[in-house]
Image (cartoon, helix red, strand yellow):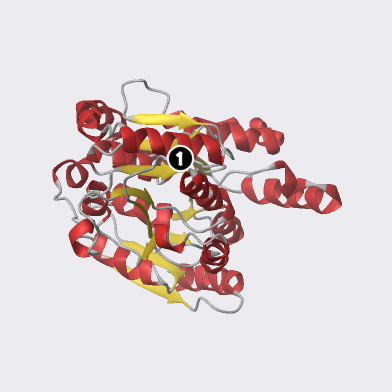
Amino acid sequence: MLIVMRWPVGGIRTFCRYVYNHFDNNRFRFTILAPELDELKVLAKDLKDYEIKWVAIKYSGNVYNRLFLGTMKCINRDDVDIIHSHGISAGLLCSIPAKLFSIPHLMTSHDSFNDNQFSGIIGVIKKATLIAGLILIDKIHYVSHEAKKNFYHHLPLLKRFEDKSFVARNGIMISQFHISERRNFQEELKLDPKTFLVGFMGRFMAPKGFRYLIDAVEIIDRKENVDFPFKVICFGWGGFIREEQNMIRRKRLSNYFIFLPFTSNVAVSLKGLNVLAIPSLWEACPLIPMEAMVAGVPVIGTDCRGLREIMTDNKLSARKIPSRDSRALADAILDEMKSPSIQNAMKYVDRAISLFDVKAQAKIIEKRVLSLLKF
């Protein structure tokens, strides 16, 4: 299997780790083609039990051209039976080589669209290009029902190719989040032991809504009756982190935010938090709230598409707030500070485990792969 990724980071890297580790390692060999980023090295460790060939390309310059040429070279050089692309960019880049060489092609869509992406004449051209490329793909895997609905809303012609589509909702590897140790941030960062810790584990990109969390902290800062210390712990770099940090400095809120490097051991970090904030504007199907709920950590998440789909069950330790609403986010954080629900959240772990175990999803995807290979 040739695995092609434009962004081997965040949810895509974690998806690969969870799903491929449940494939039959006697049946599959992987060639992974992706830009050379730090998280690609982490993925190498995650898939250590499998026979893997790594083809890393330079991250700078024309990455799309390198991915396309890299796909062609891998097909010519390696014994590729099937291509699994991740994300629309990778899917479109692989669609022509797959057809040229008659290689089955499965794309997992980790994306979702917005109206402003398709405005004007340029938008019409984008839609035509997307449809032309997507109909060349043998199977399209959507990671949630809302993700599929979103595609059909913006690209209604895809409905004519319904037989190409299937949904297997995202899931996680349960064990590490259920039984992991707790990271003691108060001790590690020399904080007051009573410090209330709010976690943010999204990328610093507009869809993740980090600036609404900044505004929420500003609202809390202005309140006079907050008598206990709190911090927002953020993980990772990249994206628009400089712009976000500049906004924090301008608002004189630096004392509330702690930025830590990317961590591959998410489980112990989650368990060190009092609550996880997910102020997203839109998602396909995020993994981090699943991980938090299985770890027994309360979640405050928005009602945006993709996220609300996994927070609808009332037997989960999750609180929904309107998206783009900093005041609602501030109120929810304050409620957690005043009446922490982290002990109560443990009651909902078994329900989270039953809903989010990746084994079922991995089986569906492996079965689809084998059907494309006529096994």
Q: Residue at x 48, y 67 (%)?
A: 238
Secondary structure found at label 1: loop
* Frontmost residue, 132 versus 35: 35
Residue 344, compared with residue 97, is above or below; it is: above
| Residue 47 in sight in this render | no
Query: Label 1: how many residues lie within 10 Å, few (<14), some (14-19) or many (20+)?
Result: many
* Frontmost residue, 14 versus 187: 187
> In the shown orientation, is residue 78 left or right of residue 271?
right
What is the x, y in percent for residue 79? Answer: 38, 65
Q: Residue at label 1?
A: 285
> In the shown orientation, is residue 63 left or right of residue 124?
left
Q: Quadrant of residue 69?
A: bottom right
* Frontmost residue, 256 versus 291: 256
Residue 101, compared with residue 323, is above or below; it is: below
Query: Mark 1 is on which residue type?
Result: Cys
| Residue 114 in sight in this render | yes
Residue farthest along the top direction in this orientation: 314
What is the x, y in percent for residue 45? Answer: 24, 65
What is the x, y in percent for residue 126? Answer: 74, 52
- In the rendered picture of this protein, how many numbered marks are placed on residues? 1
What is the x, y in percent for residue 17? Answer: 31, 54
Residue 63, compared with residue 197, is above or below; it is: below
Q: Residue at x 28, y 55 (%)?
A: 28
Identify the image quadrant of the C terminus: top left
Identify the image quadrant of the N terminus: bottom left
Q: Quadrant of residue 122?
A: bottom right
Q: Residue at x 18, y 47 (%)?
A: 176
> In the shown orientation, is residue 74 left or right of residue 263?
right
* Frontmost residue, 115 versus 144: 115
